[in-house]
Amino acid sequence: MEKYNIILLGPPGAGKGTHAEALKREFGVEHISTGDMLRAAVAAGTELGRQAKQYMDAGALVPDEVVIGIVRERLLGSQPERVLFDGFPRTPAQAEALEQVADEVGLPRAIVIYLQVSDEEVIARLSGRLQCRRCAAIYNTRYDQLEAGSQCPACKGEIYQRDDDRPEAIRHRLQVYREQTAPLIDYYRQRGQLVEVPGEGGSIEQLAAGVVAAVRAAGA
Ligand code: AMP
């Protein structure tokens, strides 16, 4: 069976979670979203969730050692052969740690899909974004007739607005992205792993098709 190691890189609101769905269908990858894992830990009230919540609510990054720990545990635990990282790595230290653990579990060198989206589009998307508490499906008030408190059309869970999608936190997350995560663009470009893909300027289906095509062209 062919192995995949795909990283979705881009600012918050670039469409990482949304395109992850298309990549799951197309390549049978296991979707590893550190944001979803951390939100699940917060909801479950675990020690990890307790530690992570203060950072998340403020739109700050959870410390590297915590996030690297949960990713290591996940990879070493299930030893998946086809993975898609969404929201990880977010710092150079995380990128280096991922390389190490990917080697340990026999995953190939990552294909890094960089979703390009303008700041204005990011702000418009995040401020209208809604998510399901139960199945983590993502919606947007721009396209979906839903509001906080609605029922999820997919699973009937509760739809809510994330605390970190409020205007103050959005501004902070964009700053954190520029300072801590954007350096990964050059890091992966220099290693010949970066594939730049438009993250706006078409329907979700068209953009997702572009992402799938880019992964194929990169050799998956
Ligand atoms: P996301 O759903 O990917 O936007 O993540 C939501 C929040 O979870 C982020 O704003 C961070 O507080 C935290 N988080 C998720 N992934 C990471 C990561 N790789 N490193 C540090 N913090 C993270």
Image (cartoon, rainbow, N blue to C red):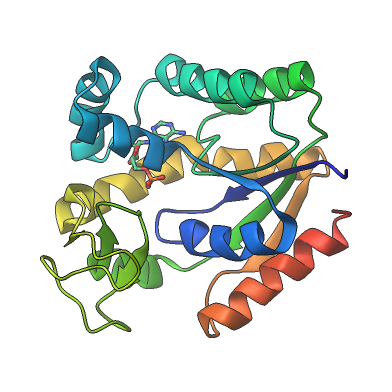
* Residue at the front extreme, as displayed: 155
The quadrant the N terminus occupies is: top right
- Please name whichever residue, 1 or 110, is drawn nearer the observer in this view of the structure: 1
Percent from the top left, x then y, of residue 203?
A: 52, 85
Left or right for 15, reference 5: left
Residue 160 in view = no
Instruction: Report the side of 105 relative to 146 (left or right).
Output: right
Ligand 1 visible in quadrant: top left
Q: Quadrant of residue 53?
A: top left
Q: Residue furthest left?
A: 149
Question: In this rendering, would 146 be left or right of 23?
Answer: left
Q: Residue visible at 29% across and 82% down?
A: 144
Please say whether residue 16 is visible from this viewpoint: yes
* Residue 29 image point, x, y percent: 67, 48
Q: Is the residue 81 above or below the residue 119 in the image? A: above
Relative image position of residue 219 (x, y in whole percent): 89, 54
* Position above or below: 135 against 185: below
As rendered, which of 148 and 194 lies closer to the eye? Answer: 148
Question: In the image, 30: left or right of 109?
Answer: left
- The answer to which of 218 and 168 lies nearer the viewer is 218
Q: Residue at x 35, y 31 (%)?
A: 61
Q: What residue is shown at x 27% (from left), y 58% (from top)? A: 132
- Residue at 36 percent across and 71 percent down: it is 120
Q: How many marks?
A: 0
Where residue 64 appears, as percent x and y from the top left, is: 45, 20
